[in-house]
Amino acid sequence: MAGEIATPNNTLYVSNIDWKIKKALLRRALHTLFTRHGKVLEIITLRRDGLRGQAWVIFEDVKAATAALHHEQGFSFFEKDLRLAYAKSKSDRIAKRDGTYVPKAKRQKADAAVGASDETAAPPPPSQEQQVPPAPADDEGQDDEVKAPPSHILFAKDLPSQCNEMMLGMLFRQYTGYKEVRIPRVGLAFVEFDSEPHATLAMERLDGFKLTTNDTLKLNYGKA
């Protein structure tokens, strides 16, 4: 793709997103996709004209952003291939953290003075900040139900209605041996791995993962 590549930074610009996806679902799905590469501080999605189909993902560090850029470029996300690039400039959140923050009015004045607008570069993240999406839950408060006999298939229950195969697949595919997700009906899912040890590792890491503010991933072994 033609155009100058922006300097590596903590923020990725994500485009070619299906603009019909509801905002809450979009942010959860993006968080699920990118959180495996490192801590995600914030995801910005705006619905106003000119900004639909785009998002900015702010990571804790540049290393995580770079890993996500390399691994998720072209990922099929709700049947559209994602286009990823470093944002043209760092987010306000990161700038305030490292002491380089400049108020928006001053930035615009400086850009106009030097003709700094670059139409080929990924746009900077909007200064408007949104609520940080749910992060993985800790080990406290997990379901104490008796686990079924070990199996290469995991069973998930009480899933939120908007949780689909693609979202769960993005969550589990980071673990070795992952094969597929099946959702026989709303609220239930089966996650298949190539072996019981691989399934067990995924369950140990993801049982209790916070899917939404009110919904936690509950995993058990399923029937082989």
Image (cartoon, rainbow, N blue to C red):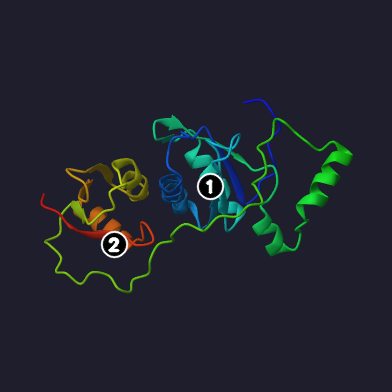
- Left or right, 36 with reference to 153: right
* Cβ atoms under marks 1 and 2 closer than 8 Å: no
Please state which amino acid type lies under the numbered disc 1: Ala
Q: Which residue is mark 1?
A: 67
Give the mark nearest the N terminus, 1 or 2: 1
Q: Quadrant of residue 185?
A: top left
- State the image coordinates of residue 134 (x, y, percent, origin top left): 43, 59
Question: Which quarter shows the N terminus?
Answer: top right
User: x and y percent of residue 224 in the render?
Assistant: 11, 49
Camera-nearest residue between 202 and 49: 49
Q: Residues within 10 Å of mark 2 (few under 14, many from 20)?
A: many
Q: Position of residue 196 (x, y in %)?
A: 19, 54
Residue 206's tag is none
| Disc 2 secondary structure class | loop
Using the image, determine if residue 187 lies above or below residue 213.
above
Residue 58 versus residue 137 in the image, above or below: above
Q: Which residue is label 2 attached to?
A: 207
Q: Nearer the viewer, residue 120 or 174?
A: 120
Farthest residue in the top direction? Answer: 2
Residue located at (20% from left, 50% from top): 188
Label 1, secondary structure: give it.
helix
At label 1, counting other C-alpha atoms closer than 10 Å, the crowd grade (few under 14, some 14-19, many 20 or more) is: some
Q: Is residue 43 left or right of residue 219?
A: right
Figure label count: 2
**Residue type of the residue flagged with mark 2:** Asp
The residue lying furthest to the right in this view is: 113
- Tell me residue 177's x, y (percent): 28, 47
Cα separation, mark 1 vs mark 2, equals 25 Å
Which residue is outermost to the bottom? 140
Residue in view at x 39 percent, y 61 percent: 213
Q: Which of the two marks, 1 or 2, is nearer to us in this view? A: 2
Q: Say which of 106 and 49 sits in front.
A: 49
